[in-house]
Amino acid sequence: MSVNLATKYESKLDERFTQKSLTEAWCGHDYNWDGTNTIKVWTIGQAAINNYTASGANRFTNGNAPTELDDEVNTYTLARKRSFAHTIDITNNQDQMFIKKTNAVLKQIWDEQLVPEIDMYRLGEWANGAGTAVINSTALTNQTLIKQLLVGGKALNNALVGRDGRVCFVTETMAVELKLASELQYNESFTGKAIVNGQIGQINGMPIVAVPDSYMPEGVEFMIKYKRASADPSKLKMLRSHDKAPGIAGTLIEGLVRYDSFVLAQKAMGIYVYGSSGIVAAPTASLSSSKIALASTTAGATIKYTTDGSNPKTSDTAQTYSSTLTVESGKTLRAYAFKSGMVNSGILSVLEDSVS
């Protein structure tokens, strides 16, 4: 006679790997979308500073009549609505030793699928909204990475970005190079700051957070972010189960998440992106027959621009560039380039009088 061995299904699931959000601690929450999916944010215009005159009329404005202080409005519309629904038939569950417990299933879907999705979306939106995006076709190594991190920090300093509340996200590939950098191997201020949730150390007072290569937009090697440079609403997290749903013998589980991320118009310079590929080249401006010409070295890229000094990535006044243009003397031209499947360029910003 043959030997028939028994088969047993274990009551413990083989769950996939998960980790907590790597971006949540660095989201901006200065604004809220309670009761609406769109908010408008004012920015007060910059005042003209004059030499005070101690006699005559209009002493504060060099004899000129005061002008009304202008303002700018930027619009941010929350669009991400992600959902799922599944049934757990009671007869199937009975014959599977009730392995599918609804609360555990809902938690697993959140941890395993939605948390990584939200992290990747945020990193992508932050990169696309960055004020500075640097491209270098040579990938960074342990010999070059530290310098570029410091150069990125310098760019934020020169843009007067707050020095507290900064973070640097690096890919896991770059994290390896960072740990091998000779400057850091015996630096306790770096190695002694490996705390929690992806943070592998600290450089120049800035936490370094490693994220899986797949989380970062393709080609991007690191990103420096000022926490309050973005608004990152999480408006709804609904995970629920119905034990008595009509037409279902068992449980109906549903989930709905509403979230989004926006780089704020006036704080774009608080984000610095560096990559070896995948980033559109920033536009350049040149003077041609008394008109300004814009160009990007990325083939097929589209350029958008403003001539009122507003951020072309967010402004309602942004226009698509098609031919040379005239900018009023003393006005600021700002432009960026974009192409589907690539990270947006940084923002070109020049006074009309400085274009040559």
Image (cartoon, rainbow, N blue to C red):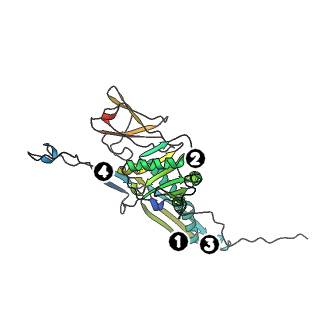
Determine contact: label 1, label 4, CB under 8 Å. Answer: no
Nearer the viewer's eye, disc 3 or disc 2? 2
Residue with the mark numbered 3? 90
Most extreme residue toward the left is 56
Secondary element under disc 3, as helix, strand or loop, is helix
- Sequence-wise, the earlier of marks 3 and 4 is 4
Horizontal and vertical percent for residue 159? 37, 48
The amino acid at mark 3 is: Ile
Total count of labels: 4
Horizontal and vertical percent for residue 85? 54, 63
Secondary element under disc 1, as helix, strand or loop, is strand
Q: Residues within 10 Å of mark 2 (few under 14, many from 20)?
A: some
Q: Is residue 239 above or below residue 345?
A: below
Residue with the mark numbered 4? 73
- Sequence-wise, the earlier of marks 1 and 4 is 4
- Sequence-wise, the earlier of marks 3 and 1 is 3
The amino acid at mark 4 is: Val
Residue 217 in sight from this viewpoint: no
Whole-angstrom CA distance, mark 4 to mark 2, is 42 Å
Foreground pick, 283 / 260: 283
Most extreme residue toward the right is 1
Q: Residue at x 39, y 45 (%)?
A: 313
Residue with the mark numbered 1? 242
Horizontal and vertical percent for residue 179? 58, 55
Q: Residues within 10 Å of mark 3 (few under 14, many from 20)?
A: some
Q: Residues within 10 Å of mark 4 (few under 14, many from 20)?
A: some
What label does residue 141 carry, if any?
2
Q: Is residue 337 above or below residue 260?
A: above
